Image (cartoon, rainbow, N blue to C red):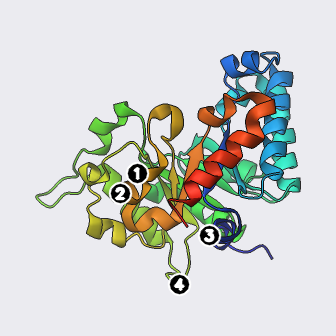
Amino acid sequence: MIAPFGTRLDSVFGSKGHLCVGVDPHPYLLTEWGLTVDAAGVRSFGLAVVEAVAASEWVGIVKPQVAFFEAYGSAGFAALEDVLAAARDAGLLVIGDAKRGDIGSTNDGYAAAWLTPGSPLEIDALTVTAFTGVGALGGLFDRAEAAGKGVFVLSATSNPESRGLQTARTAGASGVSVSRLVADEVAERNTDRTRLGDFGLVLGATKRLDDYGFAAEALRTLSTTPVLAPGFGFQGAEFPVIPHVFGPLAPNTVVSVSRSILQHGAAGLAAAIAADADALAEVIA
């Protein structure tokens, strides 16, 4: 039986480090790489990134951005299936950045597609939204846990447009921010407090988390919650901010980097990955 996602993630942290390389085949990157802007191009791009990460001694996580594949319809999804299969075969931990999330049987469908062993789109963890309420994701959480999979729920995202909604306060004099409400309810799903949980949060590295309701004490209550942290590289965050932004959650953090590595092209991927892995290792031991 497969080990729980949190256990496997913690193992990757210990053996390979915290860097996660995004597989984001932006059209302009396809052009810069000399690839066609179509399903064949995103397939070649994705396979090249997976090959470079698999060859790295210090990186064990990839995060395909599903939108760049599904833009090409069924052929794009076929390309994504090939990329995911290559990543699985290479023994990489795969976080699918699909940002799904709904209610009831719809969530069951998402779980069947992304979190079911043997599915053509099988991944290790899925990003989801919680605008329908964290409770509405219960079936998806259950399916993930049963299959040894993980879920990362958007809480305080790296884009500037998120601030108004995510810092809004819930009703009552002691109301918490929407971001904090999501975080607390997700953390409650991690019932085994002796290990890193299977259910995590997306917390942007570009944010002052205390503005979102995460004072130091709040972060300590999330001590077994994994974090997926976008915002590095092109969005402006640098690795040295990690201890300051995430505090006690820094050891739980998947540090996602995409364009600032991918811009180096296929020939430069290995060197760019190695440089970022070395720099990150100086921040998170």
- Report the Cα–Cα distance between label 3 and label 4: 11 Å
Q: What residue type is labelled 1?
A: Val
Q: Residue at x 34, y 51 (%)?
A: 179
Q: How crowded is mark 4: few (under 14 residues within 10 Å), some or many (20 or more)?
A: few
Q: How crowded is mark 1: few (under 14 residues within 10 Å), some or many (20 or more)?
A: some
Position in image of residue 33 (x %, y %): 77, 21
Q: What residue type is labelled 3?
A: Gly
Q: Which amino acid does label 2 sit on?
A: His
* SS class, disc 1: helix
Left or right of 246 in this view: 92:
right
- Counting residues from the start of the chain, the first of labels 1 and 4 encountered is 4
Q: Mark 1 points at which residue?
A: 241
Q: Quadrant of residue 160?
A: top left
Of tags 1 and 4, the one toward the viewer is 1
- Report the Cα–Cα distance between label 4 and label 2: 25 Å
Q: Are marks 3 and 1 in contact (CB under 8 Å)?
A: no
- In the image, which disc is placed on residue 244? 2
Q: In this view, does 6 lie above or below 136?
A: below
